[in-house]
Each structure stands twice: as C-alpha cells, then as structure tokens.
Image (spheres, rainbow, N blue to C red):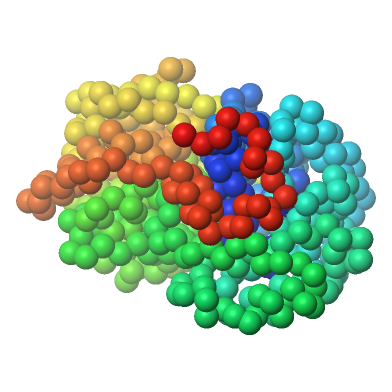
C-alpha cells in the first residue's frame, strides 16, 4: 500500500509506475483505491465509472479496469458530492450526510472489492488518500489505515521533497500512527527530488534511527510526465518556446475529465493555457470549454466572470471553439434542471451558439464508443474528416435536437455538431484529443490558419508508464521493497 504525507505527493503516479514495473516482471498486479474524490473519471467496459487515476493504473498494469479498483468515487459539486458506488451514482450527499450512517454501509463493499481483487491477482497495489495522519478523520477512515490493517498490507510512505519539510512530514506522519499501524510501514520514499541525492545525508539515517524504517528510494522530479492528473489543483500551464499553436482551456470551477488535454500540452510547438479571467484568453488559436460536474453553476460563473462575452467576441472574430460534454451543453439555448440535481436554478440560458436544449436527469449515460469524424465539415474541422476516434461518454443531460451538421458518426448514432460557419464545434465524446490522428490533424489545421506548418515529433512518444517503471527500477532499493519483484518471467 502506498500512503502519503499529504495530498498531491505523487501516490497515484508511483502506484502507476509500480504497476508497470511488477507487471513487466510477470506479476499479475491490480491497483486499488477504496475511496477517491475527483471529477476526473473514466468508464469501464461494463459501463461503470471509476477515478481516472485507477483507470490509468490498470492500463499501466496491462489489465482491463473494473469498478472493484475504485469502489467508491466522490464527485464534488456545489450541493455536496455525488456518491458513486461500484460504478453507479447513488445520489448527492453533504459531508455530514456522507460521514454519517450512510458511510458505515460502504465498508462491506470496499472489503468485498478487495477480496475479489486479491483472489484474482498475485498482488494488489493499494493507494491511500490525503494522509493517514489526519487523526480527526481516523474514526471515519475508509481508505488509509483501515485498508492497511484489514489486509495487513506492507506500507510505503511517500513525501514530496520538492515542497520542503519532507523529513519532518515523514516523521510526524509515522508518529501519529498507532503502534499496530506503524508496524506495517516498511519504507519511506522521497518523491520529486531535484538535485544530488548524496546531499540528503545525514537525514535518512537520522530518520531511520528515530523510526526503524529505511528510506527505500529517492525518486527524481519528472518534467512533463504524460500521465493523467487526478486533481484539478495540479493543472499547470504548459509553455512552449515560440509556439505555433496556442490553445486556451477554460478552467471551470467544477472542471471534469481535464486529463484529456494532457496529450495536447506535450506536443512540440503547442502551448496549452488554463484560463479563469477574460483577459487571460487573449487571442488563442482555439478555445476549449471542457466538461463540468456542475454545468449550470459553471455556466453562471462563466457569465459572471465576463468570460462568455469574451468568448462570443473571439468567435465573432473567427476564433474556433470546441465544447466537450458539459462545455457542449453550454453552447446550446438553455440547460434545464427540473429535479434540482445540480443547483437551485431550474433553468439557465446558454451561449446560444447551437439550437439545442439540454435537460438534466437522474440517469447517467456511461458508455465507451467509437466512430469517425464526418466528411465535409466546415472550418478547421474539415481536416478531421474520416479520422477514426474512440472515447467515452459520462453525462447526465440529454440534448435535443441534434445540430444540423453532426460532428461525429459513432457506432450508436450521430453526436455533437458544428455551426455552418465552422467556428463552433461540440461533442459529448471525451477522449477525441487523446488519439494521435485527430489531434495531429487539428493542430496542423490550426497552424495553417496562421500560415505555419506544424509537424509532430519525429520520434514516437515514450510510453510514460515505461518511463516511470524504468525510473523506479533505477532509484528504488528493490531488494528492500515488500514486492514480489523476484518472481515471474523477468524483464525483457
């Protein structure tokens, strides 16, 4: 089990790297996180949704993601959090409601998911949340030491040394644990280190003398690692010297599934900026309205900030706009919420760029699908005609009627739309920019509008999970890790 001294210390990334490392050595490994809080979700083959981090960890392990890998997912919205249990939403609860009686009913589901995974795989790599030293939450714990104690897991405790104070954080976290919990901690890991590890002495030895727990690895800071982020707080602007293409993504307060823009950000000559104010939009080559867990409140925020006015101005001056999922819903005439699922506002006017209306309902559409971009699309989207696309839908609203010019032909029907002048496009399908062919075609089309020629990198991208695994193999003391690394086929 990988626990951390706090949030965003790199637990999810390390679990993904360890999944790939042990899988390459012939070990059947699966990831697990009992409870996740994130609006970044993905759809499993059986139609259930889990946190995007656990989905990515399963891919790193070379296995099909299942709802057992993240049995409880909390998706924050203004009125509380939508509680997703074993892949399907069960309702919206405030923190008080969730931490009350209903939460006690969830542990058996966590234990059952763990039992199934442990019976099917040689190794389960579990991930904690936040820090196990949050003693005010100890009695309500479902995801940290309760899992570790239930399984008698070997625990690795991780600190982010780039923030500073890592040794104090490791020692303090260890000291806050109960004696039976401390006994499970097998090693400390210092993550995101920049510099010469020999300069850390004598701190690792002093930490060992205090705790009896060794530092089993110092993991370097990896720049531009193309793995999905779990938390929107980690979103950063990706800069490129003299960019040929500049893309502005509106960072909505309840932005969801933002990881799909990561592949754009690491392309050569492409700059992706996350914006929250009108002046930050400037004059990009493309504006993206991303998905949202709370579309009506986020649309109201867009209007109050003056962003919607600036977006309309950019469109009028020939800047293309792409709306995805909740962003697509915002492009219509209005969004209705008759059951009050998102807020107390039953109806809100949209940007009126498409003649569609959206009605929010209790039933989510959760589906993985594939298809093609339609031929004969106007504007920059014409370059995408015929490109194959795969992705997933994860939304509660239904939009009608379908725009006159659909954007996609999917296996289960047409999706999205494009305005007749080609300036605005929208779709419910997540993931269209994660695939190389449509992404490269769109970037070439955007660059050509300004008289530039854009080309992808000459070398194929390095698999980020292989890079992670190679890095961990080089910087962790594998002989001291409580992992079955000596079993299986071996690497090669």
Q: Is residue 415 visible?
A: yes
Q: Nearer the viewer, residue 2 or 287?
A: 2
Answer with the quarter of the image where residue 278 lies.
Answer: bottom left
Side (left or right) of 329 relative to 28: left
Up/down of 438 relative to 144, above or below: above
Q: Is residue 84 among what the camera can see?
A: no
In which image quadrant can residue 406 be found?
top left
Instruction: State left or right for residue 473 relative to residue 442.
Output: right
Residue lying at 71% horizontally and 31% vertically, measured from the top left: 121
Q: Residue furthest left?
A: 451
In the rendered image, residue 255, in percent from the top left (x then y), is placed at 52, 54
The residue shown at (41%, 28%) is: 390
User: Which image quadrant for residue 86?
Assistant: top right
193 and 135: which is toward the camera: 193
Residue 199's spot in the image, x, y percent?
52, 80
Along the line of sight, the residue nearer the viewer: 424 or 234: 234
Does 149 sit above or below residue 325?
Answer: below
């Amino acid at each position: 089990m990988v626990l951390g001294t706090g949030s965003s210390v790199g637990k999810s990334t390390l679990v993904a790297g360890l999944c790939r490392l042990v899988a390459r050595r012939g070990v059947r490994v699966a990831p697990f996180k009992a409870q996740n809080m994130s609006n970044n979700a993905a759809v499993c083959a059986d139609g259930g949704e889990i946190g995007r981090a656990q989905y990515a960890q399963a891919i790193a392990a070379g296995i099909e993601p299942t709802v057992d890998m993240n049995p409880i997912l909390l998706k924050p919205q203004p009125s509380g959090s939508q509680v997703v249990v074993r892949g399907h939403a069960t309702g919206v609860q405030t923190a008080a409601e969730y931490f009350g009686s209903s939460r006690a009913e969830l542990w058996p589901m966590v234990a059952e998911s763990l039992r199934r995974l442990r019976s099917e795989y040689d190794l389960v790599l579990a991930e904690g949340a936040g820090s196990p030293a949050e003693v005010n939450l100890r009695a309500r714990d479902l995801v940290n030491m309760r899992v570790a104690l239930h399984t008698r897991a070997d625990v690795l405790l991780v600190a982010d040394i780039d923030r500073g104070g890592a040794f104090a954080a490791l020692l303090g976290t260890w000291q806050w644990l109960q004696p039976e919990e401390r006994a499970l901690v097998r090693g400390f890991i210092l993550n995101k280190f920049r510099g010469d590890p020999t300069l850390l002495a004598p701190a690792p030895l002093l930490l060992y003398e205090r705790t009896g727990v060794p530092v089993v690895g110092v993991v370097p800071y990896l720049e531009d690692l193309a793995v999905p982020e779990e938390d929107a707080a980690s979103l950063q602007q990706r800069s490129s010297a003299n960019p040929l293409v500049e893309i502005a993504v509106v960072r909505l307060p309840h932005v969801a599934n933002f990881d799909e823009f990561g592949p754009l950000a690491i392309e050569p000559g492409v700059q992706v900026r996350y914006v929250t104010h009108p002046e930050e939009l400037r004059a990009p080559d493309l504006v993206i309205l991303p998905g949202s867990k709370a579309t009506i409140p986020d649309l109201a925020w867009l209007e109050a900030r003056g962003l919607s006015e600036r977006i309309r101005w950019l469109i009028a001056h020939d800047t293309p706009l792409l709306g995805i999922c909740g962003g697509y819903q915002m492009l219509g005439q209005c969004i209705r919420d008759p059951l009050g699922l998102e807020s107390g506002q039953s109806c809100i006017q949209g940007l009126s760029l498409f003649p569609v209306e959206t009605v929010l309902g209790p039933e989510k559409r959760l589906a993985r699908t594939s298809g093609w971009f339609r031929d004969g699309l106007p504007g920059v989207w014409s370059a995408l005609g015929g490109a194959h696309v795969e992705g997933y839908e994860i939304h509660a609203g239904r939009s009608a009627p379908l725009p006159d010019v659909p954007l996609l032909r999917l296996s289960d029907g047409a999706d999205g739309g494009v305005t007749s002048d080609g300036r605005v496009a929208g779709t419910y399908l997540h993931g269209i920019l994660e695939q190389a062919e449509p992404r490269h075609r769109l970037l070439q089309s955007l660059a050509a509008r300004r008289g530039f020629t854009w080309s992808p990198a000459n070398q194929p991208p390095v698999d980020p999970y292989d890079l992670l695994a190679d890095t961990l193999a080089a910087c962790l003391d594998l002989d001291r890790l409580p992992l079955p690394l000596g079993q299986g086929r071996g690497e090669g």
